[in-house]
Image (cartoon, coloured by chain):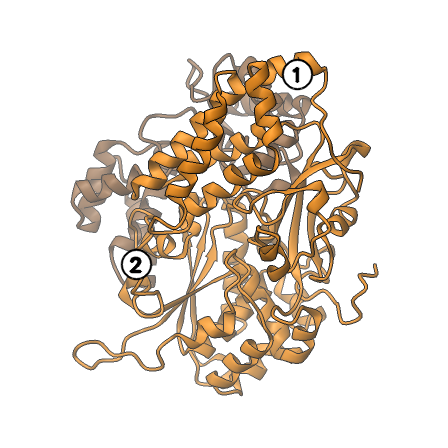
Chain colours: A orange, B brown
């Protein structure tokens, strides 16, 4: 497939459709497995960090923070108050749960060694001897597959003491979450990893100073780690060239919703949302496109007319939304945007950890107001109230969860206000549907 | 016994992996949840004694996470994802199908104690929506005839005393 990008090649998923691609044997034979580790162990940690910095790899979990920079925040040789050296920890955020996001699950089940190798290299780069992999609790099968991959890596000498004769020791431990979306937030994850409630922490101190178990820690996403072996083995230039000026490499986009071929696609970032929908087989049933959520549930919606925007971090930010976690949710013309937004708000209402009143109460109020509009009890004033509530949530809380809630809430009202007004006028969704037979408003064929 | 010797042994086996004892709280709750099907006050007390944590600490953690159930559940826990991608692909139909077939509403348990039905938030299986969890196992790209079949199979497996929905579990092995 041509993507009008001569530098592009799949970094993470070249072989995920092949039988046995999850095994160590396959990784060693067909994917230069653990060669990058061999190379990295001969480099100084600072050189590895520098390589990743220059590659322009940005965090694939949602925030898009430059990975090399994050690694460089880790103190070189931290000591406690008695002058004794402190351990440092690397943490993998595998709490994938942003609605519309399912790319990390692919890595876990199809190319786990790539992530493990990336983590060991990262441990070397930040001079840590221990990595924790925090996996969402619902992934029983996926966790056990990853544990098997870790066991195999130990047996082959890629983990444990004196790795490949380098004198470097590294251990890898899996920790299972227990069903809390908020634990994808890195400081909530750290609390959960310590056996506590998954409540986000106030920053500062940042995890690089006080992270897991009070020690300096660095948290990165599964896909971020999986990109590291390629960068080390093929060089930062090749990786950087594939991307845009400020963001290197490829992206795994999980395309779901109403498309013909939903799935995870590894793509260059110079494609538009419309292109991505084409790659995923177009809108299901030949229907018109109404809206797209481009980066997981928290990313503000785009209208069909806005879907010419490119999928890189900066273009999406400029369009008032975000690349987020790469979950592209496609919504066709027959869907009520009010109902779609309510589906998400119900989720946020359930998942708010409850520490901050703005978020705890705000997510609850928003969900109830959207429900009221759907059920026919909405008023025109509600639309202004929604904006007011959102204004009191975003930026006012310990973590970015409250901001995330306002993504679907504000964008749906702003961009599809006529749908809300229609429901308010007609007395709810059911009556509107009976009135118009099908719920078709404007959209565009892609 | 609420917290079995086997569970304690499993925890001892992974104790060295963590800098603190409290880190074992989530793993231990998982094992108790798996063994008993829920986490009772007695379980929490026993876990607290084992990990040297006050009951209040154990309880505040247990109640935070949705995977730990504070009441007895059915032997088969059916959780249907109704979040955006699953909803766009007919999750509501799966919910009504399961409710009709089992004769219960979401959040309820059948009177024979066999099935509990609930909604679940995004399972990260959006590309194969709609998705459900049956105990530990995912079932994806489901339609209503397949769901009905799955429920029939689970019913007959239960009657035959077979393990249901735990196809990758090896007893006594963490995780």
The label number, if any, that marks residue B145 in the structure image: none
1 vs 2, front mark: 1
> Farthest residue in the right direction?
A2
List x then y, in percent, for residue B146. 67, 25
Q: Give the residue pinned by disc 1.
A: A433
Q: Distance between the residues labelled 1 and 2?
A: 58 Å
Q: Callout 2: 10 Å neighbours few (<14), some, many (20+)?
A: some
Residue at (25% x, 60% y) in the render: B20
Chain on which label 2 sits = B
Q: Is residue B37 above or below residue A133?
A: above
Q: Callout 1: 10 Å neighbours few (<14), some, many (20+)?
A: some
List x then y, in percent, for residue A136. 46, 48
Q: Nearer the viewer, residue B20 or A420?
A: A420
Residue at (74% x, 35% y) in the render: A443
Label 2 residue SS: helix
Q: Nearer the viewer, residue A223 or B117?
A: A223
List x then y, in percent, for residue A4. 81, 64
Residue at (39% x, 25% y) in the render: B73
Q: Give the residue pinned by disc 2.
A: B15
* The N terminus of chain B: image quadrant: top left
Label 1 residue SS: helix
């Amino acid at each position: 497939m041509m993507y009008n990008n001569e530098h592009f090649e799949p970094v993470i998923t070249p072989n995920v459709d092949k039988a046995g691609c999850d095994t160590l044997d396959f990784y060693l034979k067909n994917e230069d497995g653990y060669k990058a580790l061999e190379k990295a162990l001969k480099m100084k940690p600072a050189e590895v960090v520098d390589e990743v910095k220059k590659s322009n790899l940005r965090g694939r979990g949602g925030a898009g923070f430059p990975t090399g920079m994050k690694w460089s925040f880790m103190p070189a040789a931290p000591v406690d108050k008695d002058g004794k050296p402190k351990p440092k920890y690397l943490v993998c955020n595998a709490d994938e749960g942003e609605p519309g996001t399912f790319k990390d699950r692919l890595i876990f089940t199809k190319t786990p060694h790539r992530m493990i190798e990336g983590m060991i290299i990262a441990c070397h780069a930040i001079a840590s001897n221990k990595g924790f992999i925090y996996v969402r609790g619902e992934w029983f099968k996926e966790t056990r597959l990853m544990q098997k991959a870790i066991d195999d890596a130990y047996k082959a000498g890629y983990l444990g003491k004196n790795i490949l004769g380098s004198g470097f020791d590294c251990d890898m431990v899996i920790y299972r979450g227990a069903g809390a979306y908020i634990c994808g937030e890195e400081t909530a994850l750290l609390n959960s990893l310590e056996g506590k409630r998954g409540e986000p922490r106030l920053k500062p101190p940042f995890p690089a100073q006080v992270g897991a178990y009070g020690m300096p820690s660095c948290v990165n996403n599964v896909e971020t780690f999986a990109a590291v072996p390629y960068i080390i083995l093929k060089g930062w230039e090749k990786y950087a060239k594939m991307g845009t000026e400020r963001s290197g490499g490829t992206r795994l986009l999980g395309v779901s919703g109403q498309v013909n071929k939903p799935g995870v696609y590894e793509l260059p970032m110079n494609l538009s949302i419309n292109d991505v929908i084409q790659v995923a087989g177009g809108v299901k049933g030949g229907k018109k496109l109404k809206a797209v959520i481009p980066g997981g549930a928290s990313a503000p919606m785009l209208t069909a007319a806005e879907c010419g925007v490119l999928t890189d971090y900066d273009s999406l930010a400029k369009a008032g939304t975000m690349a987020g976690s790469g979950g592209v949710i496609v919504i066709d013309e027959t869907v009520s945007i009010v109902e779609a937004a309510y589906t998400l708000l119900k989720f946020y209402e359930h998942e708010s950890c409850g520490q901050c009143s703005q978020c705890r109460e705000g997510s609850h109020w928003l969900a109830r107001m959207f429900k009221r509009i759907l059920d026919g009890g909405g008023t025109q004033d509600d639309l202004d109230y929604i904006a007011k509530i959102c204004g009191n949530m975003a930026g006012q809380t310990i973590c970015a969860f409250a901001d995330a809630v306002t993504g679907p809430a504000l964008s749906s009202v702003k961009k599809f206000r006529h749908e809300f007004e229609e429901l308010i006028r007609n007395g709810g969704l059911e009556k509107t549907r009976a009135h118009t037979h099908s719920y078709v408003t404007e959209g565009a064929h892609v | 016994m609420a917290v079995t010797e086997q569970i304690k042994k499993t925890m001892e086996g992974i104790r060295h992996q963590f800098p603190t004892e409290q880190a074992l709280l989530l793993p231990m709750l998982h094992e108790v949840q798996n063994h008993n099907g829920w986490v009772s006050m007695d379980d929490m007390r026993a876990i607290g004694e084992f990990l040297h944590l006050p009951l209040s600490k154990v309880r505040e953690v247990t109640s935070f996470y949705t995977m730990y159930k504070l009441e007895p559940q059915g032997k088969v826990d059916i959780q249907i994802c109704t979040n955006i991608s699953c909803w766009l692909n007919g999750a509501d139909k799966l919910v009504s199908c399961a409710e009709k077939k089992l004769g219960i509403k979401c959040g309820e348990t059948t009177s024979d104690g066999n099935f509990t039905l609930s909604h679940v938030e995004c399972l990260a299986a959006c590309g194969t929506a709609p998705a459900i969890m049956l105990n530990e196992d995912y079932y994806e790209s489901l339609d209503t005839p397949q769901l009905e079949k799955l429920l029939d199979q689970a019913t007959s497996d239960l009657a035959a005393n077979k393990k249901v929905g735990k196809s990758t579990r090896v007893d006594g092995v963490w995780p």
